[in-house]
Amino acid sequence: MKNTPIKITLFFIIFSLYSCTKFGPEHEKAWELIDKGALLIDVRTKEEFRGGHLASALNIEYENIAQISQAIGQDKNRSVVLYCRSGNRASVVLSELSKLGYNNIYNAGGLSAMQAALESLNSINKDN
């Protein structure tokens, strides 16, 4: 029982560190899909895109569902990864594309989380 306060303190420290992480397994999955050839679409504004974006990303603003659909093409099973600033606009696009019959669309969330996940994955790969 003497160690209980220490265990509780360690739990909260670890939990706090984990909570501060900008990325999670969903971002690693997004990079896995991208590495396998998924189409990457940034659904933020042109101004946001000019301020920084992921390499190889197409920039099509989230309101332009028809243009996004055209970029994906006729293959309703094509693997597509969407991202924006926080994941909200990507979620809207995912929902609209699902209504149009697209099946393999993935919301990667926000740009900063995707960048943090890439840095982490690159660091892991360098260590191996």
Image (cartoon, helix red, strand yellow):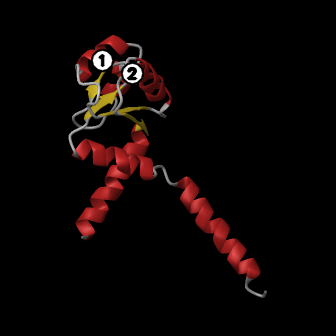
> On the image, which quarter does residue 64 sit in?
top left
Does residue 116 show up? no
Task: Name the quarter where the N terminus is drawn.
Answer: bottom right
Residue 65, compared with residue 120, is above or below; it is above
Q: Position of residue 125 (x, y in %)?
A: 25, 63
Which comes before the other along the chain, label 2 or label 1? Answer: 1
Q: Residues within 10 Å of mark 1 (few under 14, many from 20)?
A: some
Mark 1 secondary-structure assignment:
helix
User: Which mark, by number, is residue 69?
Assistant: 1
Q: Position of residue 58 (x, y in %)?
A: 26, 26
Q: Residue at x 46, y 52 (%)?
A: 24
Q: Position of residue 55 (x, y in %)?
A: 24, 37
Mark 1 and mark 2 in contact (Cβ < 8 Å)? yes
Residue 117, compared with residue 68, is above or below; it is below
Q: Amino acid at mark 2?
A: Leu
Residue 118, compared with residue 98, is above or below; it is below
Give the residue number, with chain letter if any, for mark 2. 97
